[in-house]
Amino acid sequence: MITTDFVPGSPCWIDLGSPDVRAAAAFYGAVLGWEYESMGEGEDMEGGVLRKDGRIVAGLGRLTEEGARSAWMVYYCVADADAAAEAVRQAGGTVRVPPRDLAEWGRMAQFSDPLGGEFAVWQPGTNAGVELVDEPGSLSWTELYTSDVEAAKEFYGEVLGWRFGAMEMPGGGGSYWLVTPAGQPDERMHGGMMELPAEQLSTAGGRPYWHPVFAVADCDAAVAAVTANGGSLQMGPEDAEGVGRLAVCLDPAGADFVVLAPAGR
């Protein structure tokens, strides 16, 4: 499970780059009950934070990178963003945004793994990360779809110190690899990796990609809100034994995410 006592290697922040900040805020407000708080002034909404019941659950900003798709970025907690950048280089990845300070809040950097999967790190300052997790309307899991799970395990193990455990998928669908921060018990696993052929990674143009999983009270109701507000459905809703009822969705700008009503809640 994800908690807010962010240990090194655990997800601590997510943000969305969208071509239309106002439309994205309205969409996720309808689907997940989020409220948008602009960090600027006036009508030109460039970015801000998203809150659920008053607590920060994500960031939202205007997509400015030329040619980039709208997507969620997952940030993992590190003790030293500069050391993480060097580890990425040594392991064959790419430093997309070099480490930089964001005022007194912390230090961030964005990377790509050797196959192109994009992720980021956060070295906390006064801001440790999001304020609500593992509750309806908040981040509950992170997931990587990749064309080479063994290469991904080697890279992320070297860079973030993760350990991995295999879970066999139903129907002979191969292994789903569970991710846990170094030195933490299985109860602190926070994500998974799944191998797919490149042709099934069309959302990111054939490259691997991370996406967030948001907990919801009712998966079908969340899916209905997605489609009613201009989003679309990639998969589901369907029941996953021991996991819950889930669906893979796209927002109106094409950013992918999962909604999950966990089993036993």
Image (cartoon, helix red, strand yellow):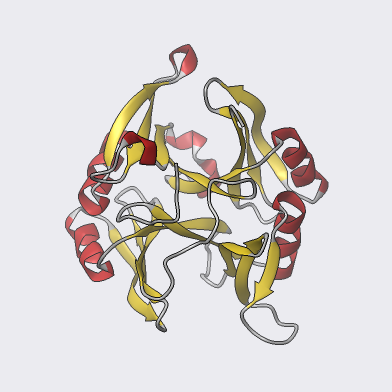
Q: Is residue 128 above or below residue 263?
A: below
**Residue pictured at 74% horizontal, 45% vertical:** 226
Q: Quadrant of the C terminus?
A: top right
Name the residue furthest bottom.
Answer: 41
Pick the front one: 164 or 173: 164
| Residue 158, image x, y percentages | 20, 49
**Residue pictured at 55% horizontal, 56% vertical:** 132
Q: Quadrant of the N terminus?
A: top left
Q: Quadrant of residue 99?
A: bottom left
- Could you tell whether 74 is left or right of 81 in the image? right
Q: Is residue 263 above or below residue 201?
A: above
Q: Is residue 17 above or below residue 1?
A: below
| Residue 147, image x, y percentages | 38, 36
| Residue 264, image x, y percentages | 59, 27
| Residue 103, image x, y percentages | 42, 84
Name the residue furthest right.
Answer: 228
- Could you tell whether 232 is left or right of 193 in the image? right
Q: Quadrant of residue 33?
A: bottom right
- Could you tell whether 143 is left or right of 164 in the image? right
Name the residue furthest top.
Answer: 171
**Residue pictured at 54% horizontal, 46% vertical:** 134
Q: Quadrant of residue 5?
A: bottom left
Question: Can you see residue 168?
Answer: yes
**Residue pictured at 78% horizontal, 45% vertical:** 225
